[in-house]
Amino acid sequence: QVQLVESGGGLVQAGESLTLSCAASRSIFSIRAMGWYRQAPGKQREWVATITNGGSTNYANSVKGRFTVSRDSAKNTVYLQMNSVKPEDTAVYYCNANEYDGFGSWGQGTQVTVSS
């Protein structure tokens, strides 16, 4: 299974921007889709965004127009650009790899805290 390491989390003020990174242990082109999820305190983990092997992207309604998922194949890294962040974006953000064989892998998560 692929190993995933997230980074880039931190404390930001509402309206600011933040970029998360997810470094994979092998080529992301061998993975069906890479996704970002988040889990706020006391809530279930929720899907945020996905980028497929073919480069298609999809976003949850709550982040559409503010977040952008992208990738750098040379670095085996997927990014989540977060603009105009809101306090409700506060959560632990996780990277996910959806493999062609049906298996999935998760990173350890990175904390994002947005102050009002």
Image: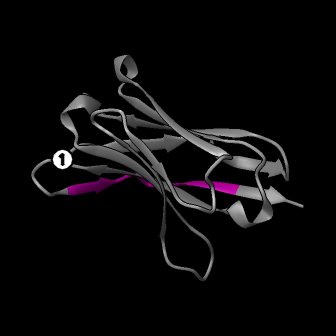
Which segment did they paint magenta?
104-112
- Position of residue 75 relative to residue 109, above or below, is above
In the picture provided, is 33 more to the left or to the right than 86? left
Give the residue number, with chain letter if any, for mark 1: 1
Number of labels in the image equals 1
Vertical placement of 23 versus 74: above or below? below
Instruction: Measuring from the top left, give residue 17's x and y in whole percent.
Output: 75, 40
Q: Nearer the viewer, residue 92 or 68?
A: 68
Magenta span: predominant SS is strand
Of residues 85 and 4, the one drawn nearer to the viewer in this rendering:
85
Report whether residue 19 is seen: yes
Rendered image quadrant of residue 16? top right
Its colouring scheme is one colour
Mark 1 crowdedness (10 Å alpha carbons): few <14, some 14-19, many ≥20: few
Query: Residue lying farthest bottom?
Result: 42
* Farthest residue, direction left: 101
Give the residue displayed 57% in from the left and 80% down from the top: 43
Q: Position of residue 77 (x, y in %)?
A: 41, 30
Three-letter code for the amino acid on which mark 1 is drawn: Gln
In the image, is residue 51 part of the stretch drawn in magenta? Answer: no
Please give the name of the residue rendered at 90% of the width and 61% of the height, measured from the top-left corner: 116
Relative horizontal placement of residue 12, taking residue 48 as reference (left or right): right
Residue 82, given in percent of the width and then of the height, sits at 66, 43
Query: Which residue is at 28% across, 54% downward?
Result: 105
Element at label 1 = loop
Q: Is residue 26 visible?
A: no
